[in-house]
Image (cartoon, coloured by chain):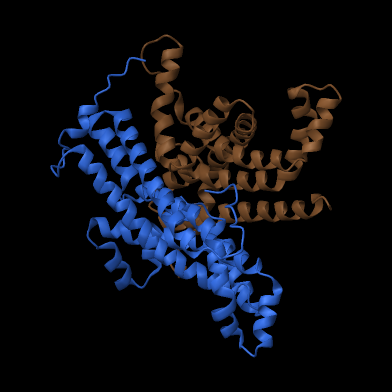
Amino acid sequence: MFAGYDFDVIQRSWVYLFKEGMTFTLTLTFLAMVGGIFFGTLLAMMRLSKFRLLGAVAGGYVNLMRSLPLVLVIFWFFFLVPYIYGAMMGEGKPIPIGAFYSALITFTMFEAAYYCEIMRAGIQSVARGQVWAGYALGLDYWQTMARIVLPQAFRNMLPVLLTQTIILFQDTSLVYVISATDFLGAASKVANRDYRLVEMYTFVAVVYFVISFGLSSLVKNLQQRIAIIR
Amino acid sequence: MNYNWNWGILLQPEPGGTGTYLYYLVVGLGWTLATALAAWVIALAIGSVLGTLRTTPMPWVVRLGDAYVEIFRNVPLIVQMFLWFFVVPELLPKAAGDWVKQMPPPWSQYLPAVLCLGIYTSVRIAEQVKSGINSLPRGQRLAGTALGLTLAQTYRYVILPQAFRIVLPPLTSESMNIVKNSSVALTIGLLELTGRARAMQEFSFKVFEAFAAATVIYLLTNLVVVFAMRALEKKVRVPGLISASPSAGGH
């Protein structure tokens, strides 16, 4: 099976793969996670707010994102963002923003919908009395949220948020469709240049496996350690 | 924004000469559904067997099942797609590999896409079947054994009929996921709905009409899937159980 398997191509290109590709992938994953959790939390608060309209808007957004394929959403933002940016700058024509920023906006907006559902479950898992206690102490809505509800919600949902981030890490490989040089994109460039598709794609699979498996084992470990005994 | 909308483009003929752009997209939906349905059959078959085996008291089988799940869960779908399309035909015996590579166009992409998507989804179904079985009270299994049923009989007559009815709601979201995930097959050249929207955008330069049409078609498909699964759920609901709600996260 490994007859004619050319390990040399991996040795020649791994520095490039990690320095260019993996840096792109990890930066994108990290920033999209931070942005996604931020907007996701806001969306969750909107969905749970007593203002019906806010709830409906957030709910519509989340359901829309969750019923479209990520590839289609990547295409949407790739073409839409330059138009919006161009209009905002008053140029009247689309301004290209590059694959990285396009991908960052896409993943932040897309993952926000998934993080929203997690945070919504997290907020709902906090006992109602906590909120009343906050109001009874004279805190307003934002103070109650920031100091009482959200810290507990984050703690309860931490393993799920991290698991979703591992999914996000894997999903970033789909930026291949807009020809970005993420880890897979970099490997695919080398693969096609040297005609070493078998070697490069198996190598990519192994690297993704090791990272995702390692991270999910860590999450499992964390889950057992931080579980609150009730 | 100064974008010239032209919805009439959908009714104009596409350059391939098969009909209008709208027809072109609808054929794409056909390929999306054909891929998703065939993959769904594979996923359901492997997932049910695997999920069941992982709850049996046979340590080696359980370990093998766990390994399968971890492998196919921790590699991104697009990478798996490339493995099935570019790598597997090279590793097969030469005659078989050549046969796969020489299949006429849509099929040489369709087959790897279906296998990839089926196996990728089977892992998620296996997890859900397993947790469905584990959610049953232990007494069910013990009662089966006490009645003198063998392990196989206990599963066949006591555990599985209940477990599958519990597992159905989360399977709704999986059947939507498989439709959405089939769009990744465009990376190996299968012209399903998203792939055709992308092609239409390249032929006609009408970016947003193409993607908006695809978006609407996906939303309608989702509605149909949700209603169909809801009807099925109602039909097989276990009397006396509060129906479980699907879990958050994942896609």
Q: Is residue A80 above or below residue B65?
A: above
Left or right relative to B165: residue A190: left
Q: Residue at x 24, y 48 (%)?
A: B27
Identify the residue at the far right of this view: A137
Identify the residue at the far top of this view: A90
Quadrant of residue B163 in the image? bottom right
Quadrant of residue B207 in the image? top left
Identify the residue at the far bottom of this view: B148
Chain letter, blue in picture: B
Q: Residue at x 48, y 55 (%)?
A: B172
Q: Nearer the viewer, residue B140 or A64?
A: B140
Residue B171 lies, in percent from the top left, at 50, 58
Q: Colour of chain A?
A: brown
Q: Residue at x 45, y 18 (%)?
A: A85
Q: Is residue A218 above or below residue A53?
A: below
Quadrant position of the N terminus of chain A in the picture:
bottom left
Q: Is residue A166 above or below residue B60?
A: above
Q: Nearer the viewer, residue A29 or A142?
A: A142
Residue A92 in view in this figure: yes
Residue B189 lies, in percent from the top left, at 31, 49
Left or right relative to A101: residue A50: right
Q: Residue at x 55, y 74 (%)?
A: B160
Residue A225 lies, in percent from the top left, at 81, 52
Q: How many marks?
A: 0
Residue A200 in view in this figure: no
Residue A11 lies, in percent from the top left, at 54, 52
Identify the residue at the far left of this view: B17
